[in-house]
């Protein structure tokens, strides 16, 4: 099974053009499923090696999902099942499967959780938290402004290049999940913040060579990572005195919620967020205080 998982990983990268995050998650899920099958085989006296995907039936699969439900959220269990289904489809395409044990196994219904978001006042406090007189502060102001103005995922934010921006048309080209591209509007405040930040880039990088294509850089002149952005947001949440635990993704949620509260069309919000399904965007139709 290990060799088949490795082949599936190569297929995800080369044929499906899956994002590195998706590849990592799917492969980890499949290895976890393999370990479950090995442990089950050992309990039955069949040894701890030689797991064959064809030996799995719907009953074994449901047993695995039940075990995961006790340890993981429904959304995580749903992703694990999705990885297994994709894996068995891969085997079927290559004629390596006698029967598909995932057929008829339903994905667990997700919990109805409201997206974590900020009020408009809290967003303003967060956007103004970075210092306006240091290169790092100006970068972080631009970073927060762009995230909120465009509703970007953190991976999309750190992947931005200067050539993706069109200040004249006030739009940004974004590369989202599955390498899909979309065009989103960007506000004037974000564009001004970007211009101010770009002017101090040499100072931020202390005169050293830096990546001239990437928008958001660290002091070493390299593209920022999602983990770095999360650390910055944690810091500025404290500086702004916000009580809630806020992630970079909460700014994306706030973008969608505030647009909806202001009367924006749900379909337009779906396109700006890059959601494949409208049902994903419908999470933002929760009742706000303004609506009440």
Image (tube, grey):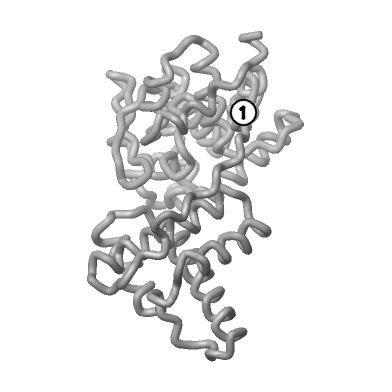
Q: Is residue 196 visible?
A: no
Give neighbour class at mark 1: few <14, some 14-19, many 20+ (Cα, 10 Å). Answer: many
> Residue 267 vs residue 11: left or right?
right
Q: Is residue 7 visible?
A: yes
Q: Position of residue 51 (x, y in %)?
A: 45, 82
Classify mark 1: helix, strand or loop.
loop
Q: Quadrant of the N terminus?
A: bottom left
Residue 219 lies, with reference to residue 130, above or below; the image says below
Of residues 177 and 34, the one nearer the viewer is 34
- Taking the spot 43% from the left edge, 59% from the top edge, the residue there is 83
Q: Position of residue 65 (x, y in %)?
A: 56, 60
- Taking the spot 61% from the left edge, 23% from the top edge, the residue there is 123
Residue ID for mark 1: 117
Of residues 210 and 156, the one nearer the viewer is 156
Q: Quadrant of residue 158?
A: top left
Of residues 48 and 168, the one nearer the viewer is 48
Q: Quadrant of residue 69?
A: bottom right
Count of labels in the image: 1
> Residue 53 vs residue 112: left or right?
left
Of residues 235 and 115, the one nearer the viewer is 115
Residue 140 lies, with reference to residue 70, above or below; the image says above
- Taking the spot 66% from the left edge, 8% from the top edge, the residue there is 292
- Taking the spot 30% from the left edge, 71% from the top edge, the residue there is 97
Q: Position of residue 175 (x, y in %)?
A: 33, 40
């Amino acid at each position: 099974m290990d060799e088949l998982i490795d082949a599936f990983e190569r297929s995800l990268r080369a044929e499906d053009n899956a994002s590195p995050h998706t590849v990592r998650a799917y492969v980890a899920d499949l290895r976890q499923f393999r370990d479950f099958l090995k442990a089950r085989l050992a309990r039955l006296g069949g040894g701890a090696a030689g797991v064959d995907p064809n030996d799995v039936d719907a009953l074994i699969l449901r047993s695995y999902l039940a075990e995961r439900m006790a340890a993981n959220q429904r959304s995580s269990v749903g992703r694990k099942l999705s990885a297994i289904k994709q894996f068995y489809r891969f085997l079927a395409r290559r004629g390596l499967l006698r029967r598909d044990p995932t057929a008829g196994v339903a994905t667990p219904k997700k919990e109805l959780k409201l997206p974590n978001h900020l009020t408009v006042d809290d967003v303003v406090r967060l956007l103004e938290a970075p210092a306006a007189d240091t290169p790092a502060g100006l970068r972080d102001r631009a970073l927060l402004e762009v995230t909120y103005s465009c509703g970007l995922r953190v991976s999309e934010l750190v992947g931005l290049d200067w050539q993706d921006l069109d200040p004249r048309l006030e739009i940004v080209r974004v590369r989202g999940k599955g390498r899909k591209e979309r065009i989103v509007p960007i506000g004037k405040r974000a564009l001004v913040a970007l211009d101010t930040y770009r002017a101090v880039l040499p100072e931020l990088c202390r005169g050293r060579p830096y990546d001239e294509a990437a928008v958001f850089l660290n002091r070493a002149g390299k593209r920022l990572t999602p983990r770095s952005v999360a650390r910055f947001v944690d810091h500025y949440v404290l500086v702004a005195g916000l009580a809630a635990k806020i992630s970079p993704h909460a700014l994306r949620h706030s973008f969608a919620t505030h647009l909806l509260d202001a009367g924006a069309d749900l379909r337009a919000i779906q396109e700006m967020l890059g959601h494949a399904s409208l049902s994903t965007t419908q999470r933002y139709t929760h009742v706000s205080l303004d609506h009440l």
